[in-house]
Amino acid sequence: MSPNLRIALRFLTAKKRAMLMSLSCTVLGVGLFVLTQATTSGFEEFFIKTILGTDGAMRIEDKIQDTLRQMTAGGGSDFQISQRQGLKYIEGVEEPKLIINALKDFSNVSGAAPVLRGSVLVRADFKNESAQVFGISLEEHLKVSDLGRQIVQGDVATFREQPTGALMGRVLADRLQLSTGSSFILEAQGQRMRFTVSAIYETGVADIDKLRVYVHLSEARSLLQKPSGVSFVQVNLFEKDRAPQNSIQIQDVLKHSAKPWQEREKSWLSTFRALRISSAITVSVFTLIAGLAMFNTLAMIVLEKTKDIAILRSMGYERRDITQIFLWQAGIVLAIGAFLGCVVGALSTLGVSYMPLPISGIFKTETFVVSWNIWHYVEAIATAALMVMIASLIPARRAARLEPGDIVRGTAQ
Amino acid sequence: MADSANFALRCDNLHRYLGQDDARVHVLKGVSFEARRGQVYAIVGPSGCGKSTLLYLLGLLDQPDGGEIEINGRKMSNTDDLARTAARGEHIGFVFQFHFLMLEFTALENVMMPMRKLGRLSLPEMTDRAHSLLASVGLGEKTHRLGTQLSGGEQQRVAVARALANQPSIILADEPTGNLDVKNSALVFDLLTRLAKENGQAVVLVTHNPEIAQRCDLTRPMRDGLFV
């Protein structure tokens, strides 16, 4: 053990009460930071999981119209000027099979499924509701969504076997008082077709559960009178976070607009991020208090230990040794505080994860959703380290600046 | 040259002012002094004459406003804090009036403190030396007592042992017996002088005690910032 660390430890143990106060503040700061990050990130991640499981990581829709203007020099020259005039789109995907086949060449793409979408009126025995019909190819769609796991009544197998079967959102089914086996009519563009509720799903996203009716793609084509093409191709990715980069590549290669989930859910993601940052700022106040407590304790020790500082300096201890002795004290409190804070944070996160909290609307959960992420602990420790070390630097430097002659003479400032 | 090698400490024409503005006082007015190895020097004089100020300057705890200080032949007046600190650790041992032990540490740890910083000896060697020094000041049985568990006389004896820890060539003592009774004063002084003589160290002590001063090899009286 270095002499400076040895001295720091002994100084620390001599001021137990003050040090315990600093330690408590550090533990509280780190623990609360971890807890708030775990809960806010937990909800954010759960929202992302829900939305990815419903609408996939990317949507390919609307063909890009070629608006390139070109001028070529005459006289057999190769000279050519090209200028893009701004993107124009042709609605929908005309050749979904070609697009899906082409997507197989992208290594990050785990699946792609065609979807034909249209507005409909749902007529039930007692009530009518406006809705959106989603014509899907079931097996392909199950690879790009969690629809199979979102079924809360009935099962997917029934839908698979029933050509006129439908998967209905729970809110819509409740409004129309429909259950599995009930029949209803979908009406669009003068066309009317009868369907049977094969199963009821619930994503937890109110806007989806009250609007969407999934039917087989062939039935949707008949209903919407669209014998070819689809509205969009839903794409799933192995690495979801690479969606923005992949979408640029796909758009360039396939000449169709490709929208990543980060862009599609921008507003909600911004809200969650703002919430996470604001809670981190709020909780940082606790680490600031930890820093102030540390400052106060060290300033007190500097005042009480001026003679010891003079002795050390007279024995050949340098200014940087004195600084180190005080920074070691802060470091020791910080290390113990950070460790205990992480333990407290982890235990409270675990406790909170069992707390009942029924939420539905943007997702559905019955308990607090928490996220276990090592970076929350790293961030908490880094914040505490920053606050405590900055706060310690001032008294430590002050101690180092003391002139031993002034202290011995009794005129130290 | 041979004569120069005998001097552990020299100063020439030292000036020091203390205080600021109207309260500024010219404490040392061109003091010159030299101390040979193996000799014990007493600086005596009335309070406020500049004895302690001179001692702190000689010990490189303070910086002069003018003049030269030489430690073992090396000029220290214009050196930086790092060099002065290193010189203190290697060449100078201090004994202060109020013991100045680090009270959270045992007698043994206090004596080992300068050795740990200098880092010349291994841990077992440091421990052996600290034990031996404490035994030589009569505290061989109390090595593991905290500073707070020792009497004033015992604390001052630990301070003497600590001052000798790195075998410095110069021992500076600021009223080392000023806070002790007659018996302890004699004990501490005898220790300091005996150990210093044995090791060929120059001892410079500031004292008000005429009996102590008389027993030194050389007494230098001071008045109004000058030797008289």
Image (cartoon, grey):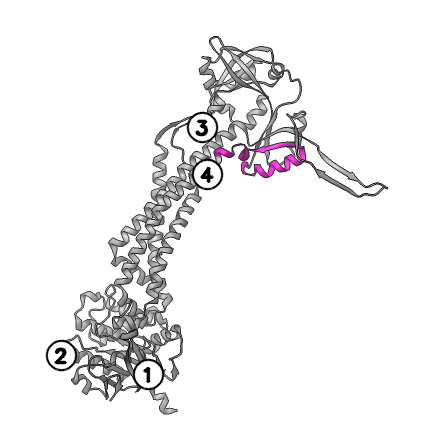
Mark 2 vs mark 3, foreground winner is 3
The residue at the point 70 percent across, 32 percent down is A66
Q: Are marks 1 and 4 on the same chain?
A: no
Q: Alpha carbon of mark 2 to alpha carbon of mark 3: how far?
A: 87 Å
Identify which residue, A108 or A186, lies in the foreground: A186
Q: Chain of mark 3?
A: A
Q: Is residue A151 magenta?
A: no
| Residue under numbered circle 3 | A363
For residue B122, which quarter of the picture?
A: bottom left
Q: Alpha carbon of mark 2 to alpha carbon of mark 4: how far?
A: 76 Å
For residue B39, which quarter of the picture?
A: bottom left
Q: Is residue A250 magenta?
A: yes
Mark 4 vs mark 3, foreground winner is 4
Q: Alpha carbon of mark 4 to alpha carbon of mark 3: how far?
A: 17 Å
| Residue under numbered circle 1 | B14
| Residue under numbered circle 4 | A273
Q: Earlier in the sequence, mark 2 or mark 1?
A: 1
Identify which residue, A208 or B96, lies in the foreground: A208
- Where does the magenta region start and end? A239-268
Most frequent secondary structure within the magenta stretch:
helix
Q: Alpha carbon of mark 1 to alpha carbon of mark 3: how far?
A: 82 Å
Mark 4 near mark 3, Cβ–Cβ under 8 Å?
no
User: Could you tell me residue A114's position as x and y percent?
Assistant: 61, 24
